[in-house]
Amino acid sequence: AQKVTQAQTEISVVEKEDVTLDCVYETRDTTYYLFWYKQPPSGELVFLIRRNSFDEQNEISGRYSWNFQKSTSSFNFTITASQVVDSAVYFCALSEAGWHQTGANNLFFGTGTRLTVIP
Amino acid sequence: GAVVSQHPSRVICKSGTSVKIECRSLDFQATTMFWYRQFPKQSLMLMATSNEGSKATYEQGVEKDKFLINHASLTLSTLTVTSAHPEDSSFYICSARVRTVYNEQFFGPGTRLTVL
């Protein structure tokens, strides 16, 4: 069964500090995809990144970076030099590979981490 | 590309009335759409899977007679909350799935329902 765990429910940092959001997942699939979404106070989910299970290269995009470690089933997200605009709830999600014709949902969300950046 | 819209974005209604929420994929066809519900400070909870031309598949504990889902076309799915009660107040989010190697879901902006 698929499961995504985000152990940190809430984190507060002071502006310009670095912060890492943890994500641990469980799956029996050998091929899967991992996602991070940002949900600001407006509510709309903002897609941040998708990572394939067979690509363990870390990725950096501006102040954002992601560390994917298959050995520990983790996909952690780091924000460098945090800003107030980074305040949001961040969700990690796992997607199964393959096409499900009907019925089955393929996206499993963690419970989210609420990040507050204090000016 | 891959834009999903929801309408309305916010609705306030009296207890006992029915509310319809529309989810549209604007620039692609989606054979499958999903409806999620999110209570304050909680994660997204999948309510149902909507497949074009067939009945929706509801998750355990979701009342299908209360949350009516219609997927009339490849670009439109609707969720109707019938006889709404204050406990139905929540944030409802739809997503549309694209048939790609990633099976990505693209999310709508959400609808905030408040039942008085």
Image: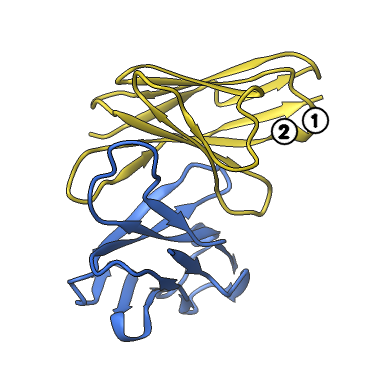
Residue A30 position, x and y percent, is 24, 69
Q: What chain does badge 2 belong to?
A: B
Q: Which chain is yellow?
A: B
Q: Residue at x 31, y 32 (%)?
A: B3
What crowding class fits label 2: few (fewer than 14 Cα within 10 Å), some (14-19), or many (20 or more)?
many
Residue A61 position, x and y percent, is 26, 66
Q: Which residue is mark 2?
A: B89
Q: State whether residue B116 is above or below residue A107.
A: above
For residue A78, what is the image quadrant? bottom left
Relative depth, front residue between A41 and B1: B1
From the viewer's perspective, tell me whether residue B44 is left or right of residue A62: right
- Report which colour depicts chain A: blue
**Mark 1 and mark 2 residues within 8 Å of each other at the beta carbon:** yes
Give, as a three-letter code, the residue at label 2. Answer: Ser
For residue B52, what is the image quadrant? top left
Q: Secondary structure at mark 1?
A: helix
From the viewer's perspective, tell me whether residue A5 is left or right of residue B5: right
Give, as a three-letter code, the residue at label 1. Answer: Pro
- Report the Cα–Cα distance between label 1 and label 2: 5 Å
Relative depth, front residue between A72 and A36: A72
Q: Quadrant of the C terminus of chain A?
A: bottom right
Q: Which residue is mark 1?
A: B86
